Amino acid sequence: MAQQRKIGLGKGLSALLNDTEEVRQHQQQAAGAVVTKEVQPGSVSFIQMSAVAVNPFQPRSDFDQDALQELADSIKLQGLIQPITVRKTGGNQYQLISGERRLRASKLAGLTEIPAYVRTANDQQMLEMALIENIQRENLNAIEVALSFQRMMDECHLKQEELGDRVSKNRSTVTNYLRLLKLPPMIQAAIRDGQLSMGHARALINVSDVDKQLYIFREIIEKGLSVRKVEELVRLVSEQAYSKKVKAAAQHAPSLSFQFQKIQDDLASKFSTKVKLNVKSKQGKGSIEIPFTSEDDLSRILELLDW
């Protein structure tokens, strides 16, 4: 029988590293061992690999096999230093909360026991913890982050502000990620596969027309456009679209008086963009339209308005 071994949480990293060889020997010698002592929530203990079920809420489905094998080789040599996190489901059975990559690599390394931090969590907490851990991974692509954000909002019933607090990101960052999910599937796949950067994607989400988004996307792929070039192309496409609308409206709109035309020209000069003055009656009632081509352009206009 292998006696259960607990790891002190307050010992620090150096102490854990010093224990590495002992931990490795314990793991290698644990084949066929059965843990009989019940593990209490809040503790870090060695538990049987066979007693750990994968997390059904795990948002990540792709694991690089070469990277897994490298981690498995490291575990064979040094042991697993960072415990996985599980919740107790009954008896000596557990469900993974976080650390699936470490669990998979440990299985490849041939371990039969694994150090685990046991927590108490309900299904919603399980989902939230798994999603947050997933979002915090450095190698996660932007679409995976966006999908995780959307799942947290839908399944954990969070608003964007609450989500931002949970993942330590401001609301505008959360919004930009969520807007990626409105892009055509072909563009989302390119972001997921690393063909487009987040910078390219941010420029594309400012284009409202799907056909124009796909046109710019093909230009990026075929010509290898930089983010700055894409931003310029988006601005050009937006200005052309606006110009067509202005011309079409001008054909049906009554001409402005000299006084109103001068006001319109002065406003266009002030805001460095085309301004439309709509005069709807002889009493001078109407509206002023100030278009913008991107969020940055809107910010510039608002600054001029002292907003």
Image: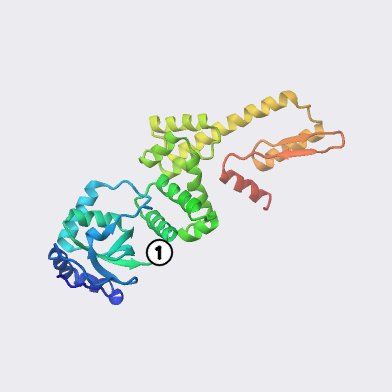
Is 293 on the left-hand or right-hand side of 102?
A: right
Determine which quarter of the picture holds residue 290: top right
Count neighbours of disc 1 (C-alpha within 10 A) and say few if under 14, some if 14 to 19, many if 20 or more: some
Q: Residue at x 66, y 49 (%)?
A: 304
State the residue lying farthest toward the right.
Answer: 283
Residue 148 in the image: state x and y as whole percent.
43, 50
Mark count: 1
Residue 280 in the image: state x and y as whole percent.
81, 33
Residue 165 in the image: state x and y as whole percent.
50, 60
Q: Is residue 37 above or below residue 140?
A: below
Residue toward you, 245 or 95: 95
Instruction: Confirm whether residue 37 shows in the render.
Output: yes
Q: Residue at x 31, y 46 (%)?
A: 62
- Residue tagged by mark 1? 121
Colour approach in the figure: rainbow
State the residue lying farthest toward the front.
Answer: 91
Determine which quarter of the picture holds residue 221: top left
Q: Residue at x 76, y 34 (%)?
A: 278
Residue toward you, 292 or 27: 27
Q: Residue at x 20, y 52 (%)?
A: 70
Residue 118 in the image: state x and y as whole percent.
32, 67
Q: Amino acid at mark 1?
A: Ala
As helix, strand or loop, the secondary structure at mark 1 comes to loop
Q: Is residue 247 above or below residue 202?
A: above
